[in-house]
Amino acid sequence: MSQLNVIHAAVIGLAATFVVLAFDRAGELRKDQYVYVPPAPKVAAAPAAVDPDKGKPPPHNDKVEDLPEGKNRELTFYTCTACHGVALIKAQGLTRDLWDSTLDLMVEKHRMPPIKPEERTEILDYLAEQFPPRRKGRGSDNPFLK
Amino acid sequence: MPRSGTSKASRRNVLKGVGMATIGASLPPVGSALAQGAPAAKGPKLLDMEGKAKLAVLGDKPLVAETQAELLDDSVTPTAKLFIRNNGQVPDVTGDPKAWKVKIDGEVNTPMEITVGDLMSKFPAVTYQLMLECGGNGRSFFTPEARGNQWTNGGAGCPMWTGVRLADVLKAAGLKSSAVYIGSYGADPTLAGDTDKPSISRGVPIAKAMEEHTLIAFKLNGQDMPLIHGAPVRLVIPGWPASVSTKWLKRIWVRDKEHDGPGMGGFSYRVPKKPIVPGSKGDEKDMAILESMPVRSVITFPADGTRLTSRKLDLRGHAWAGDFDIKTVDISTDYGVTWKPAKVDAPANKYAWQNFSASIELPTTGYYEVWAKATDSKGVTQPFQAANWNPQGYGANPINRIRVLVES
């Protein structure tokens, strides 16, 4: 009986030692220490990844100063350039009425988030003042326009 | 394309698009000028992009660039010189073009999702030289200004397109008798970076969709479709505003009524049924969809502003008229007092532009305007000034003019 107990004790002791060693090796007993992880063996080179941006136009970012100076310039800049560049704004020459319907178009067709009424007025003030109709000739002073 | 790819694209686009615009706005002006070349001292900013010529940039974000008249000189427009018009952002390159799927659903007996590989193997490929023209081409000729990108005549080109006929694909899906219109969708995220909403979705009546020159195209001038022009597949619906020629094609929805996607209503791609006062707001009820593009001519040689050393002028250009052929092109060097017919070549096929040329002896040295006026097969010609003004500026096709100086 006593001999069996000795063998049991030896087996249990050895098993416990292995378990403790295994935990130690796994880093479980020294959690705040870095564990050496051998580098993964190099496998055959992966197939060349496709650059998802290849063929795209270069990124473009404008700055506030790209718009002419004027009251409400910053508000106009940040509202409009969330989606599109200032070149599009500067190419326009519209009456306040048409600028107003342009903002409708941006909200309805181009999904611009709605703007607060007072901000809309300020943006319209800026756009109508800075970018009014500029092209001269027949049609620029129509007798039936207002 | 798997959905996971779409959501990844969404994150990246949000970062690059909206986020960077705001971040960039607060940074010193370093990269932006370098990205597309500093603007020339005079004239438009020129495009600086791999694979593309120095086109005139109308807008950087979204990228919109037109082909200057003298760059339109080739009989077949080279890919590098084809104009660029984006409504949203450019989607990511697909790693496996043949696995790209196009869905055909709606009023069909057998809705399907077909891969580009199957499109190529199951349907005959055809190649045509076809006009692609922005609906707003000529907008800058309106007085007062109409809203939108200020195109001269360069929102147009006529390259070779290879693809399968949309008609063959729709027949395979089996059109129901209720099918009257198609609406098409591309993979381009909106300018705000959304990939779950269309940036634009337009369409055409079934008869136009079934026309034998209407293609799902996968090659441009014999090469795989470049990303910027709609890789891996796009619609080419020639003769109509190019916004119906959906790039990065993902879905064709066969409708039982006129399509109503973004870009189909209001003043978009519409012209007045009843003339409106130029510069006024107009009324949406008075507008009708712009279908066939109007008759137009462009002198591509010599360039506007050329100094000539001889009174003899050999000029050339192209003319086209949407769904119709060109019957005549006339040239005037005296502000329309007298006209002389140019030689007009037959089109390579229906929907290809037609080359014209003329040899003119200018009476003296000095300053001349050379005007070109095309007339289509219905007898419809170009007006002396942009006509039928509308708030978003469609259909401006006045007589083309270049200025030359004959020096002794």
Image (cartoon, coloured by chain):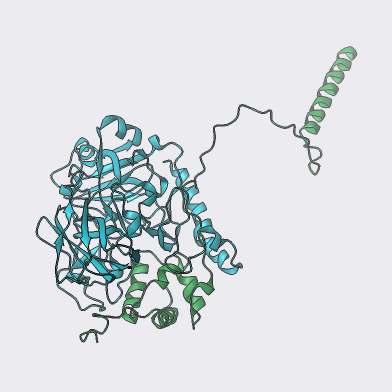
Q: Residue at x 53, y 58 (%)?
A: B35
Quadrant for residue B268, please give it.
Answer: bottom left
The cyan chain is B
- Residue B263 seen from this side: yes
Camera-side residue of B330 and B226? B330
Instruction: Name above or below for residue B136 compared with residue A14.
Output: below
Q: Residue at x 52, y 43 (%)?
A: A51
Quadrant for residue B31, please give it.
Answer: bottom right
Residue A136 appears at what percent x and percent y?
30, 80
Extreme residue in the front direction: B408
Colour for chain A in the figure:
green
Quarter of the figure that contains the C terminus of chain B: bottom left
Residue A101 appears at what percent x and percent y?
32, 75
Quarter of the figure that contains the N terminus of chain B: top left
Instruction: Name above or below for residue B239 compared with residue B331.
Output: above
Instruction: Name above or below for residue B237 compared with residue B24.
Output: above
Instruction: Tally the numbered discs.
Output: 0
Residue B397 appears at what percent x and percent y?
22, 65
Residue A129 appears at what percent x and percent y?
41, 83
Q: Is residue B140 left or right of residue B330?
A: right
Q: Is residue A71 left or right of residue A112?
A: right
Extreme residue in the left direction: B378
Quadrant for residue B259, please give it.
Answer: bottom left
Instruction: Name above or below for residue A41 compared with residue B366.
Output: above
- Residue A114 seen from this side: no
Camera-side residue of B286 and B46? B46
